[in-house]
C-alpha cells in the first residue's frame, strides 16, 4: 500500500547495502510526498522517490562530502541542511504531516535500535499525528553476518546484547551496568563503540570479562569497502587504532567471533578486492555496476558519455506519426527501445500504434520466426529485447551475436523488398544495417533517437580510478571519449576489458592494450570474460 497522506512512516533503511532495504521501505519511498533522511542511508536509497517529492536531509552531521548524492534533478530542500537538532526534526515531521503530506522518515538500520525512532514516535503521538513503523535490518546483525560472525550460535552464544558504546564510563549516572555486561552469557554487540573502545574494553575487563575473549570491529558493514579487524577484548582497541578503523563501525565481543574463520564469505566472492571501472553512460551503468558489486568488486563509475534524447526532432516525429506503415522496425539498443516508446507517447499514441496493416509470416528452416499483426520488430540483442518487452513488445528477431552484421544475417528470411523499414538508433551509429537493407530493395528511414555526447568525468572518480584492476568498455565511443578526457590520467596499470571486436579496435587505436575481449558481445558476455580473467589471476 502506498504512503497515506497525513501519516509519518518511521522507516529503517538497513545497514548500507541497498539490497538490504525492505520491500515496504521502497514502496513507501516511491509514493511519499516528503522524505526526511539521515546520513547513514544506502547509496541510491532515494532513487525511487517521486521526481516531485521533497527530499530533506536532517542528518546530525553537516551535509559535507560524504552525504550520499542522489538524482541530480532533485530540488534539494534548503531546510535542515546541517546539524538538525532532534527537536527541530520532530517539529518538521509534525508540520509536514499536518500539512497533509505523506511523510517518510528514513533512518539507517532499524528506526528503534539506537535510532531515536522511539522519541520521534512519541512526539508524533503527542501531537496527534498518525505514524507507522517499518523495521529495518539493524547493523548489529547485518554487519556481523557480512563479516562471517553469527551473533548467536547453538554451541557458543545463547544470547546477544545490543549495547551503546557511546556512554561515558566515567559518568556516575552511566546507563551501562558493566558488571552485568561482564557477566552477560552471550555475545556483546556495541554500536557507536569505536571512540570509547579502549575505555569500554577496560571497564569490561575490570568487571571480570576475559581479556582473551575474541573480539572484532566491523567497519562499513555491508557497504563497499567493508573491513573487519579481529583481535581479543584486551587487544582490539590497539588493533583498531593501528588499522585506522573509522565510523561507522560495530564492535562484537564473544566466542562467535572465531567462527569467522570458517564462515567469512564476503572476502571470498569472485571479484573481492578488485577495483573495476565502468565507463558506460550513467543511465545504463547501474545494472553492470550492481552486478559487479554483487560479485565483490569495488566499482568506480566513470561515465565517458551521456545520452541526449532527440525524440522531439522533426525526423523522429514524422517517423512516429506514421509508425504503423512500417513493415519492419529495427531497434539497435536498449536506449533506443525506451526512446521509441517515449516518442510514441509524446505523439499521444501507445504500443497499439505498432499494430499497423502490414502482415507477413517469416519462416526459417520450417519454423515461424515472426509474423502476426503489425510490423516485424527486430532487436539487436537480448538487452534491447528486454527493453522492448518492458513496453509490451516481444521482439520477433533477436540475433545470437549482437552486432549489426548478425542482425543483417538474422533478417535474411524477412521479405524487405519494396517495404518501409524503420531503423531506430543512435545518431552516430554505423550505417551497415541501413545500407544492407537498402541493397535488398527496402525503403529505409534511419531515425536518430538520441545522441551520445561526451561526459566530463568527475575529478574524484578519476582519482578513484587510479589503481584500478580493470577498465570495462562497452562501446567504441566510450573508449575514444574516456581516453581523450583522461589523457595521461588513464589508469595504465588496469586490464582493459572490451565488449567486442569493434570496441577493441577503438581501444587499440587509442593506444590501449586489450587484455580481455568478450566472446558474447553484450554486457553478460563482458562480465563472463572479466570473471574468467580474474579467476586465473
Ligand atoms: N539504527 C541503526 C543504528 C544507529 S546508531 C541500526 O539499527 O543499525 C549508529 C551506529 O550504528 C554506528 O556508530 C555504528 O556502530 C552502527 N552502524 C550503523 N551502520 C553500520 C554499518 N554499516 N557498519 C557497522 N556499523 C554500523
Image (tube, rainbow, N blue to C red):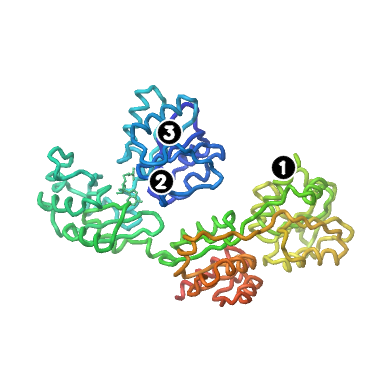
Q: For numbered disc 3, what is the local secondary structure? A: strand
Residue neighbourhood size for the residue with mark 2, other residues' Cα within 10 Å, grouped as few (<14), some (14–19), many (≥20): some
Q: Which residue is mark 3?
A: 9
Residue neighbourhood size for the residue with mark 3, other residues' Cα within 10 Å, grouped as few (<14), some (14–19), many (≥20): many
The numbered mark at residue 161 is: none
Q: For numbered disc 2, what is the local secondary structure? A: loop
Q: Quadrant of residue 435?
A: bottom right
Quadrant location of the C terminus in the rendered image: bottom left
Q: Is residue 98 above or below residue 491?
A: above
Frontmost of labels 2 and 3 is 2
**Residue 337 in view (yes/no):** yes
Q: Which residue is mark 2?
A: 63
Question: How far apart in space, not on screen, are marks 1 and 3 (Cα)?
Answer: 35 Å
Query: Relative to the observer, which residue lies in front, 380 or 315?
Result: 315
Residue 350, given in percent of the width and then of the height, sits at 73, 42
Residue 299, given in percent of the width and then of the height, sits at 47, 61
The numbered mark at residue 345 is: 1
Query: Relative to the observer, which residue lies in front, 260 or 56?
Result: 56
Q: Quadrant of residue 523?
A: bottom right
Q: Is residue 423 above or below residue 29?
A: below
Residue 430, given in percent of the width and then of the height, sits at 74, 66
Amino acid at each position: 500500500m502506498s504512503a497515506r497522506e497525513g501519516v509519518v512512516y518511521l522507516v529503517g533503511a538497513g545497514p548500507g547495502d541497498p539490497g538490504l532495504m525492505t520491500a515496504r521501505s521502497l514502496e513507501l519511498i516511491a509514493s511519499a510526498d516528503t522524505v526526511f533522511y539521515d546520513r547513514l542511508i544506502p547509496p541510491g536509497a532515494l532513487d525511487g522517490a517521486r521526481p516531485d517529492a521533497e527530499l530533506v536531509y536532517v542528518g546530525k552531521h553537516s551535509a559535507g562530502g560524504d552525504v550520499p548524492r542522489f538524482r541530480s534533478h532533485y530540488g534539494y530542500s534548503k531546510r535542515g541542511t546541517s546539524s538538525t537538532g532532534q527537536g527541530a526534526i520532530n517539529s518538521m515531521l509534525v508540520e509536514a504531516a499536518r500539512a497533509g503530506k505523506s511523510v517518510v522518515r528514513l533512518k539507517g538500520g532499524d528506526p528503534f535500535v539506537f535510532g531515536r525512532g522511539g522519541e520521534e514516535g512519541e512526539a508524533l503521538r503527542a501531537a496527534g499525528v498518525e505514524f507507522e513503523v517499518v523495521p529495518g535490518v539493524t547493523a548489529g546483525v547485518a554487519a556481523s553476518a557480512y563479516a562471517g560472525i553469527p551473533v548467536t550460535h547453538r554451541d557458543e552464544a545463547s544470547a546477544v546484547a545490543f549495547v551503546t558504546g557511546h556512554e561515558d564510563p566515567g559518568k556516575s549516572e552511566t546507563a551501562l551496568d558493566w558488571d552485568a555486561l561482564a557477566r552477560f552469557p552471550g555475545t556483546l554487540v556495541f554500536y557507536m563503540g569505536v571512540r570509547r573502545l579502549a575505555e569500554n574494553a577496560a571497564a569490561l575487563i575490570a568487571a571480570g570479562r576475559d581479556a582473551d575473549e575474541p573480539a572484532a570491529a566491523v567497519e562499513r558493514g555491508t557497504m563497499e569497502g567493508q573491513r573487519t579487524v579481529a583481535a581479543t577484548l584486551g587487544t582490539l582497541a590497539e588493533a583498531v587504532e593501528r588499522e585506522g578503523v573509522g565510523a561507522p563501525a560495530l564492535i562484537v565481543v564473544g566466542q562467535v567471533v572465531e567462527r569467522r574463520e570458517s564462515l567469512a564469505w564476503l572476502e571470498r566472492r569472485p571479484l573481492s578486492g578488485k577495483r573495476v571501472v565502468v565507463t558506460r553512460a550513467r543511465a545504463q551503468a547501474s545494472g553492470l555496476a550492481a552486478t559487479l558489486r554483487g560479485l565483490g568488486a569495488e566499482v568506480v563509475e566513470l561515465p565517458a558519455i551521456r545520452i541526449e534524447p532527440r525524440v522531439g526532432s522533426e525526423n523522429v516525429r514524422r517517423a512516429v506519426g506514421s509508425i504503423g506503415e512500417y513493415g519492419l522496425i529495427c531497434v539497435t539498443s536498449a536506449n533506443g527501445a525506451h526512446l521509441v516508446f517515449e516518442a510514441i507517447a509524446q505523439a499521444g499514441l501507445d504500443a497499439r500504434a505498432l499494430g499497423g496493416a502490414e502482415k507477413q509470416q517469416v519462416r526459417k528452416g520450417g519454423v515461424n520466426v515472426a509474423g502476426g499483426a503489425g510490423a516485424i520488430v527486430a532487436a539487436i540483442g537480448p538487452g534491447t529485447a528486454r527493453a522492448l518487452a518492458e513496453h509490451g513488445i516481444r521482439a520477433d528477431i533477436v540475433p545470437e551475436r549482437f552486432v549489426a552484421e548478425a542482425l543483417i544475417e538474422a533478417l535474411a528470411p524477412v521479405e524487405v523488398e519494396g517495404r518501409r523499414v524503420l531503423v531506430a538508433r543512435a545518431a552516430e551509429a554505423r550505417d551497415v544495417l541501413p545500407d544492407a537493407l537498402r541493397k535488398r530493395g527496402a525503403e529505409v528511414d534511419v531515425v536518430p533517437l538520441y545522441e551520445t555526447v561526451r561526459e566530463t568525468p568527475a575529478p574524484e572518480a578519476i582519482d578513484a580510478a587510479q589503481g584500478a584492476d580493470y577498465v570495462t568498455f562497452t562501446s567504441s565511443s566510450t573508449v575514444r571519449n574516456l581516453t581523450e578526457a583522461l589523457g595521461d590520467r588513464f589508469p595504465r596499470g588496469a586490464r582493459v576489458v572490451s565488449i567486442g571486436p569493434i570496441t577493441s579496435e577503438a581501444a587499440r587505436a587509442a593506444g590501449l592494450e586489450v587484455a580481455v575481449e568478450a566472446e558474447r558481445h553484450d554486457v553478460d558476455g563482458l562480465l563472463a570474460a572479466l570473471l574468467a580473467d580474474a579467476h586465473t589471476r
